[in-house]
Image (cartoon, grey):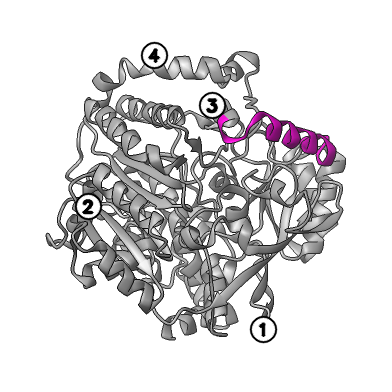
Amino acid sequence: MNAKKLKQELNALLGDEARIRTDAFECELYSTDVGSVPFANRLFETVPHLVVQPQTVDALTKVVRFASTEKVALFPRGAGSSGLGGVVPTKEGIALDLSALNRILALNREQKTIMVQTGTRWSTIETAAQQEGLSLSVYPSSFFSTVGGWIASGGYGIGSFQFGHLKEQIESIEVLFPSGDVRLFTAADKEFPLFFGTEGQFGVLLAATLKVRKTPERQLPQLLYFGGVDAALTFVTELIQSKIRPYHIKYLDAAHLKEVNKLIGEELYAERDAVLVTLEDHAEDLKFRQFAKNRGIAADEYLARYLWHERLFPMKRRSTQPTLLACELIMPLRYVATYMNKARWIAKRSGLDLQAEAHMAGETDALVLLSFLSDVRNPWRYLAHLALVPRLTMLGIKRGGAPYNVGIWNVPFITQKADPQTLRAYRAYKRKVDPCNILNPNKFFAVRTRWGVIPDLLFNPSLFKLLIRGASLFTPLMARSGEDRNHESVLEKTMYSCVKCGSCAAQCPAYAVTQDESLVPKNKLYLAKKLHEGGHVSKREAEKAFLCMHCGLCREVCQNDLDLVAAWEELEQRLEQRFGRPEQAVREFVSIAEDSPAYWRCVHAQEI
């Protein structure tokens, strides 16, 4: 079914119950996630036919039933804050934007539960819970991501050392299947675990009932320095064995603290490997201090508190290399140190400064994140750097690790993510509930490209690993070529340094009022990039860039601390020179915004 007919039928079906977008630029915004893979659109149809943003569950149900009947692919999406293609379309179909389904349905203070629609952001839930003296037990470091997104793709994060995986903190989930049926699953149901980490393969998550807890009276972070990763993780192992119960334990390498010094403009932190331990009980804190004595060098308390505050901004960087690449694995704690030492050696051969961190995900495992910087504008060097990511994943798998997410780009490692029995169960359930394979097709289980058999074979686990090993022979040479760019305007630096995390969307009054993705700051930077690189920009697209309150809230939550206000001024100057300034459209927008309750909720939230 072509896009025009699809829009006609959905308009007739949904009326005012959903926003339907077919504008080329708006659809293009749904063709990516936080990852930058230059050849993705050559392998797949990444731009959807259209975008549907249901305003009600009833509208969503109609869309899913329609897609099932017409065999149209559906690609559900929350904040799009993952980087492995889990929300990226792979064939023509419908991008299903669930961000408007963001209501808090019920909060029970006595039972300590909160029921939310799965387009709700974690930051919104925490704010609502705190008004009742409650808090989340676990939450992602991507705090502005959605509940449905983290259920589908992750589950380990802040608080996981004490409270475990996300599924242990959820009482029930409500799922819409391709048939249009809706089912409620509780933690006691055998199907319940199937929806965690399977990236939307079986159904569309509608709602979740989360366990919350009484807000802790205090959070007491402590930072200790060590002579290297081995000493730091030996300390962590001994701490776990001591039965002291911190809320959260995080390892940070020396490169991480060097970057923090660069960000704050002072050498406040020792550039050594370190462990950040956060406790919530005064007695446990005293035990920890006694335990840690003579086991490491304690940093000043204010330094620990700053790092704890920055836990929700894990992507902050200052570099002339703007593109962040990362490898994320779940790994037995006992192998993490040897893995990091080997990974650092591999990165150094390619002239890269690797940053490493690890969140303890319980007593035996850690969520390990390795990251480094590149520049997507230097094609050969960037491709060489990109090839390092699966190589580091393979290295981690050798040491008992498993990829944290799958999406498209980790499909060759699916058998390490799930054991054969689990994978068989997944495939059987997929055939049962989605026999036409309309939900998030051509990824997770197996890749299907637009070109057929030969490209598909490249994702065969054995061949893929062989290719990566071969590429690693040339990576050190290719990775060192290229140039740094030290003379850029504010806009150029900003648009290439944006990590597309989506934190800005949660705070943007223009987006709150319009629910128009074109107005989200990260997408305005996408427009700026098109303009800068000579791509086609229409007058209508240009006009939308002026629909901004210039309030600066986007900068306050920017992961990379980018000078967004200055960037908007430069972008508007460039667009005005080419298209003129749309004064009437700006006046109408400001009038609509000031009459909108959504705008005043944003303003009020900042005043609290």
Q: Three-letter amino acid code at disc 3?
A: Arg
First-in-chain label (4 vs 3): 3
First-in-chain label (1 vs 3): 3
Q: Secondary structure at mark 2?
A: helix
Q: Three-letter amino acid code at disc 1?
A: Glu
| Disc marking residue 110 | 1
Query: Do the CB atoms of the residues marked 2 and 3 lie less than 8 Å apart?
Result: no
Q: Please rate how many residues cluster around mark 4, counting C-alpha atoms within 10 Å: few if below 14, some from 14 to 19, many from 20.
A: few
Can you say which quadrant of the picture contains the C terminus?
A: bottom left
Picture residue at 19% right of the left edge, 51% below the top? 258
First-in-chain label (2 vs 3): 3
| Identity of the residue furthest to the front in this view | 242
Q: Position of residue 277 (x, y in %)?
A: 34, 62
| Disc marking residue 470 | 4
Query: Do the CB atoms of the residues marked 4 and 2 lie less than 8 Å apart?
Result: no
Q: Nearer the viewer, mark 2 or mark 1?
A: 1
